[in-house]
Image (cartoon, rainbow, N blue to C red):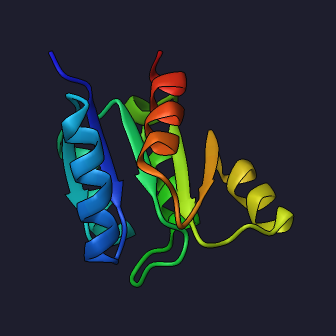
Amino acid sequence: MAKVIMTADDSASIRQMVCFTLKESGYEVVEAVDGKDALQKIGSRSVDMLITDLNMPNLDGLGLIRGVRAMPACKFIPIIMLTTESHDTKKQEGKDAGATGWIVKPFKPEQLLAVVKKVLG
């Protein structure tokens, strides 16, 4: 059975690119338009990994990570930040919230896949 990865990003073009890249490699993808949407969707289905943007309306990536980490079923799923932010302070905030890794946009599809494979095993 394919691993399920949720992607949360307010940019439709980024979601499309992430989706296409992951589906091409055999992953099942659930899309969310922001953190609030992602939290609602992740509460109703199990996912193996979350890839989220940092800056989103309604609920940002840090709020989403904290919300996901508060759910017993999602306490240990890998969470990757996919964002334009590259400051060490932001990375530390992400890590403190519970992010597993960090990819800076723009990204190469093979870079995303390498991280996904490394984290999911």
Please give left or right for residue 85 compared with residue 53 in the image. right
Where residue 116 sits in the image (x, y, percent)? 46, 33
Residue placed most toward the observer, 12 or 41: 12
Q: Residue at x 45, y 58 (%)?
A: 52
Q: Residue at x 68, y 56 (%)?
A: 94
Residue placed most toward the observer, 89 or 45: 89
Above or below for 78 versus 65: above
Residue 7 visible from this viewpoint: yes
Q: How many marks?
A: 0
| Residue ranking furthest to the right | 88
Please give left or right for residue 56 compared with residue 27 in the image. right
- Image quarter hosting the N terminus: top left
Q: Classify residue 92 by image quadrant.
A: bottom right
Where residue 97 sits in the image (x, y, percent)? 66, 53
Above or below for 53 versus 29: below
Q: Residue at x 52, y 65 (%)?
A: 61
| Residue ranking furthest to the bottom | 57
Q: Residue at x 19, y 39 (%)?
A: 23
Residue 70 visible from this viewpoint: no
Q: Classify residue 88 by image quadrant.
A: bottom right
Please give left or right for residue 91 compared with residue 11 in the image. right
Where residue 55 sits in the image (x, y, percent)? 53, 77
